Image: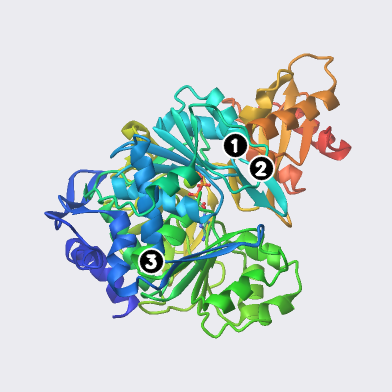
Amino acid sequence: MRYEEFHRWSLEDPEGFWAEQAKAIHWHVPPQRILDDDNPPFRKWFAGGETNLCHNAVDRHLAERGDQLALVAISSETGVTREITYRELHREVNVFAASLVELGVGRGDRVVIYMPNIAEAVFAMLACARIGAIHSVVFGGFAAHNLALRIDDAEPALLVCADAGMRGGKVIPYKPLVDAALAEAASPPPRVLVVDRGLDPGMARVEGRDIDYAPLRERHLGSEVPVAWLESNEPSYLLYTSGTTGKPKGVQRDVGGHAVALALSMWAIYDIRPGQVMFSTSDVGWAVGHSYNVYGPLIAGATSILYEGLPTSPDPGVWWRICETYGVRTMFSSPTAVRVLKKQDEAWLKRYDLSKFQWLFLAGEPLDEPTARWITDGLGKTVIDNYWQTETGWPVLCLMPGVELKPVKFGSPGLPAPGYRLRVINEVTGEDAPAGEKGVLVIEPPMPPGCLTTVWRNDARFLASYFGHFKDLLYSSLDWAIRDADGYTFILGRTDDVINVAGHRLGTREIEEAVASHPAVAEAAVVGVQDDLKGQVPIVFATLKAAGSDPADAATGMLRSVVDQLGAVARPSRVYVVGALPKTRSGKLLRRSLQALAEARDPGDLSTLDDPAALDEVKRALARGSDA
Ligand code: ATP
Ligand code: MG
């Protein structure tokens, strides 16, 4: 079947299409209704069906591929590689599940997982799925305050962490961050399960609260825990977005729709069949990690490679060496990672046998043409940009080599994935934007399987955040887009402001709040400015409360506030103390103008500017240099 035909089938006969795709997974009880769309935009895929993600990812493969590698966890930081077969994975997941049960975790309970890219993170996720507990993985780079916010929203029964992660040869202790987060949280879990890697010998334990995993594992070796059969629409996991509006949104995923969408994407988009090898360089704390390091490849009966470390260490050939060693067919990474490699000798791309290597998929941010060309030419392989969001859980725009590979157009993530009816509409009129004209990318309901079902315990926020922008319950991606005459979509950036620092998405609003929490600060504006290496870095413009406080002292204090609350990754590269910030007459900060000036561009439309003197202040501050 050709791409157009396949996509048309998914839109014209969604129930027939998805009923067919649902055959790829095991159902304990088959779905009673393929689509229950009685209460849009809430929709139930595979209603009445009962299944289990862990069963589909692990148990189902035992008979045929028990001795095949399921997971290869490689750390270039510790130098340890762990090769885990499906049989071993089954054993470890059962042991972990038995441990969770012993600690009182049951169906519907939340478990926060705060771990680096190690095999135990995968065991913990699958163990939760096995018993019907809802995991909420928090990226290990997040500071204590961020972790505390997520804990308070999820109200977990248990937190699972590791003693430490490593980055660039440096041990990053996680446990002190967990301790600080639990001290700050209003609803701390009663227990913390610690996987001790032996990286932080001085790790402190709280008597009666903290439990070491190793002895628990010993005790439960050989345990078998029956899978909990869940109705297709029960929650499987929560994953918090970075949150431009301050409080992060708990994206909630279902069970059956999630499994079916991933199963389809594995063969149709990523072109991976059972027994083949996929290497996603993501962290388990991101949506890509959930979908394409854990659930997708395992549901497909493939081998998944999990990597802890930098793309350049011990040398810039490390990823390609892994591809040669394990015969990787499909690799999934980010434009940021490729930009890091681009600083290295191109010869590293040619040093290894990549005869099994077929596709490099990149996602997470716009893929600029020079970067796309560099990696395409360097590897001599097809590089496929794909666009999606934490909310969707799998691609919205992509090319589908497993069905039919349409031509790559540099700068575009391609064409709609199956089940997505996409439009680009004028943000004011709500009418379809003609080809070549900018608009907002929206998804027409019903959203396909795999997409978020709601925001955790906050249907109102789900409705307001995504469906309140346009009529007809259109889902707004909150991204600008242009569609060309061939139907290829180009993504132009967000309709709200997020900074992307080396692949980490930070809400400007979050950083502003951290800056503004410094006692000397009256008001702060944070914008992202271009940076060759990191993509973007945050810079701060702030006004001080008291005339007379020292700008340099205040600026240093602001940096400290940001690092303390959000982590080093959010550290602004420059701080400008000014007398006034440019605002519109209605009182909104003119962030776009600030950003333009900071990048030495034209500040654009200033017709709404309230006080021109504020703009002059900013120009003077930029000319003078950073206060920190
Ligand atoms: P939050 O919603 O909390 O602000 P976020 O949107 O930064 O967080 P993600 O869900 O990881 O977090 O990112 C999805 C966004 O990343 C998309 O909405 C889009 O802006 C951008 N993006 C992802 N893939 C691509 C791509 N291939 N091309 C261009 N932009 C992309
Ligand atoms: Mg978003």
Q: Is residue 1 visible?
A: yes
Q: Is residue 246 visible?
A: no
User: Label 2 amino acid?
Assistant: Asp
Looking at the figure, which quarter contains the C terminus?
top right
Q: Are marks 1 and 3 in contact (CB under 8 Å)?
A: no
**At which x and y percent is residue 539?**
72, 39
User: Label 1 amino acid?
Assistant: Lys
**Dot placed on the residue nearer the N-terminal end, 2 or 3:** 3
Q: Is 466 above or below relative to 493? A: above
**Quadrant of residue 541 in the image?**
top right
- Element type at marker 2? loop
Q: Which residue is mark 1?
A: 175
158 and 104: which is toward the camera: 104
- Element type at marker 3? helix
Tell whether circle 1 marks a residue whose Cβ is less than 8 angstroms from ligand 1.
Answer: no
- Element type at marker 1? helix
**At which x and y percent is residue 157?**
39, 32
**Dot placed on the residue nearer the N-terminal end, 1 or 2:** 1
In the figure, is residue 576 to the left or right of 59? right
Looking at the figure, which quarter contains the N terminus?
bottom left
Q: Which residue is mark 3?
A: 86
Q: Which residue is mark 2?
A: 200
